[in-house]
Structures are given as C-alpha cells and as structure tokens.
Amino acid sequence: MVHRGVVYRAADLNRITILARNNRIMTNIKGPAIFLAQFMGDEAPFNSLDGICKYMADLGYKGVQIPTWDSRLIDLEKCATSETYADELKGKIGEHGLEITELASHLQGQLVATHPAYQKMYEGFAPAEVAGNAKATQEWAVQQMKWNAKASKNLGITAHPTFPGALLWPYLYPWPQRPAGLVEEAFGELARRWTPILNVFDECGVDCAYELHPGEDLFDGTSFERFLEATDNHERVTINYDPSHFVLQCLDYLQFIDIYHERISAYHVKDAEFNPTGRQGVYSGYAGWADRAGRFRSLGDGQVDFKGIFSKLSQYGYDGWAVLEWECAIKSSAQGAAEGAPFITEHLIEVTEKAFDDFADAGFDAAANRKILGLG
C-alpha cells in the first residue's frame, strides 16, 4: 500500500488504521519537537549545536527543526554536497536522542522575492557582500533554496518549511485603487522565480512547505491558491501549517485543515490571541507586540484550539512532526520551551487501530449485503 508517497508492507499495517467507511488512513503525529531559531544566542548552551541539543533533549523534546541560516547549527552547502557530512550531522544530533525534523529557510526564502520598500530592512538576512545589491541578493537566496532541497534529501527529510517572499505586500489594502493586472503580474513573477527552485525540490523528493504569514504574498488560503495556480499546481507546493497567523487574521484555522489538508506537509505548534477593543483591531495602530490586539503567546496561553487541530490532522493522516515555534511578548523563552514539550505530548493522539463499534460487527458478506438492500 502507498500513502503520502510511502510504501507500506503488510507488517506495517498494524500501525495504520484504515477506516473502510470513509476510505481514509489515520496516522500518528510525531513529537514533541522544537524550532531552534528563536533560542539561539551568544551564551552557552544556546551558542552551539551540542549545547542547544542537550538543552532541548533534557526538556523532553525528540526532534529539532534546524534554521539553515545559522552556521553554528549547520554548514548548508556542505550538507547539500556531502552525504558524509549529512550523516555526521544526523549522528551528532542523534547522540542527544534527537532527530532532525526539517531544515527551515524562512530568511533565505524571504529574499527570493522582495519589494524594494523592504530591501534595506532585509539586508541582515544575507551576507554583507550582497548588501544593497538586489540582483545579487536574490541570486544568493535562490542558491540557498536549492541547497536546502539537496541538504534535506541527504538528511532523508521530505518537507522543508520556508517563506515565499513578497512583491505585492505593500498593496495588500485596496486603497489607493490597484491598477488592473497588478495582482496577477505579482503572482506570475513569484511563480517564475520559484518554479526552478520547486523543480529542484521535486528532483530531491522534498515538499516546499510555505508558511502562510503576513508580510508574505502567501498569507491565507486564497493567496495560496493563487500561487498554486500560477505554478500550474506544482506537486511540491505545500503548506507549513501555523494556526497562530490565522488567529490574528480571524480566519477559521480548523476549517482550513478540512480544505487544504492534502497540501499540509509541516506543522508549527504556535499559540496566539486576538482581543480587539474600541481602540484597535487587526491593524493595531502600530503598537508593539505586547500591546497589540493580536499577539503571539506561549503554548496554552492563547486562544488556539489545539485539541481540534491535533484531532483534524490525525483524522486526515498527517504523519509529520509537531514542532513548537515559540514566540511570546510576555513569557520568557526558557519557560516557553520547558512548558512546550509536555504540552505537545499531551495533545498527541495515538490513533485507533479499530472501529469503536467493531464489537457489533455481524460479519456479513457481499451476498448478505445485497439481501439487506432487497436486491435478492
């Protein structure tokens, strides 16, 4: 049997439930895992791969998501070009009882498509030698993305969270009136830039999981669909599901799973809250994070229905990792990380291997079914 590109032997089927009634396969989500980007720093144990892996393993995490822009964690080019290095990296992390869940390239992906208004603000995302040179910055970002695909393949990883970048974001609100064709031109250009990258991901057998995020041209379901259409429904265009960004948009993040579950290949477990007042709403009047109506919170402190999310993802057969992305304007990262592992563990669902009403199975055959239907 083949499911999500994986061939299962008969012996594997005891780990997978086949619900004959709706022809759906349920699988167990892996976790807990954590994205390391927000925890790296200048002091031990947060300034080295060994140090941060030991720290996270001691908290109970089983996997780590590696930001590939941080050379303290990975030599991206070497990982893309050397299977030996990739094996050594896996082994080094494995010594702490951890797995690499995914590589992540949000900063590099952002620079594949950047509106000039943000070029200066993004200079810190790329090497100093390309600063101020838009063409050189984009070329650097494209190469980085191709290395991310090849590095993921060498590590045996099949999904890769990233950002798509943005050409259209300054024109999100339709005032002043947008010129006819502006939106179509932007998504067409975005697809032209990403398609060669996506083809490399396809050659490597890796999904490119875009995080739908404000500041990106892909920020909700409809914008994702525009991009998917512009790339001719490219097989490797998938989603890094993060409900926190949908809470801040007042988007139904549970129904989102119903609609797009076939394209979800990665999952950031991240909480948020939206508390509008008579003074501010979605836009929050340029307030800082702690004072915004919509703000990110540590797991359990926000409004996200994680029981609903884990149930739906399990129902639809998501078999990837549940990865904490910690961001909170109030609670410390140390407390957030410590609370995150048990929170995710408590929400993981061990999917059933049988229907709850199997005790009442009458064991009828095809002939009996025809009789029941009055068909003789």
Image (cartoon, rainbow, N blue to C red):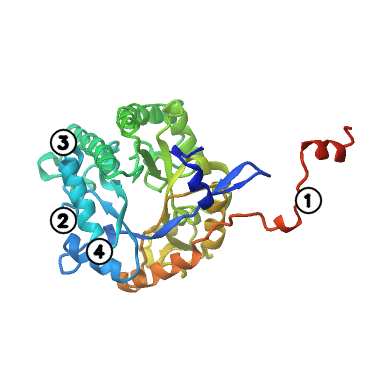
Q: Tell me, yes or no, whether the two marked residues, 2 and 4, touch with CB atoms within 8 Å.
A: no
Circle 1 residue: 362
Which mark's residue is nearer the viewer, 4 or 3?
Answer: 4
Numbered label attached to residue 97: none
- Give the Cα distance between marks 3 and 2: 26 Å
- Give the Cα distance between marks 1 and 3: 72 Å
- Give the Cα distance between marks 1 and 2: 61 Å
Circle 4 residue: 96
Q: Element at badge 1?
A: loop
Residue 164: percent from left, percent from top: 35, 40
Q: Is 156 on the left-hand or right-hand side of 319? A: left
Identified at 28% across, 36% down, the residue is 112
Identified at 47% across, 33% down, the residue is 226
Q: Is 20 on the left-hand or right-hand side of 61? A: right
- Give the Cα distance between marks 4 and 1: 50 Å
Q: Element at badge 2?
A: loop
In-front residue for pair 259/53 = 53
Lower sequence index among marks 1 and 2: 2
Residue 203 figure quarter:
top left
Q: Quadrant of the C terminus?
A: top right
Lower sequence index among marks 4 and 3: 4
Q: Element at badge 3?
A: loop
Q: Which three-letter amino acid code belongs to the residue tagged 3?
A: Asn
Q: Which three-letter amino acid code belongs to the residue tagged 4?
A: His
Q: Which three-letter amino acid code belongs to the residue tagged 2?
A: Arg
Residue 141: percent from left, percent from top: 22, 38
Numbered label attached to residue 133: 3
Residue 161: percent from left, percent from top: 35, 46
Q: Is residue 253 visible?
A: no
- Give the Cα distance between marks 4 and 3: 41 Å
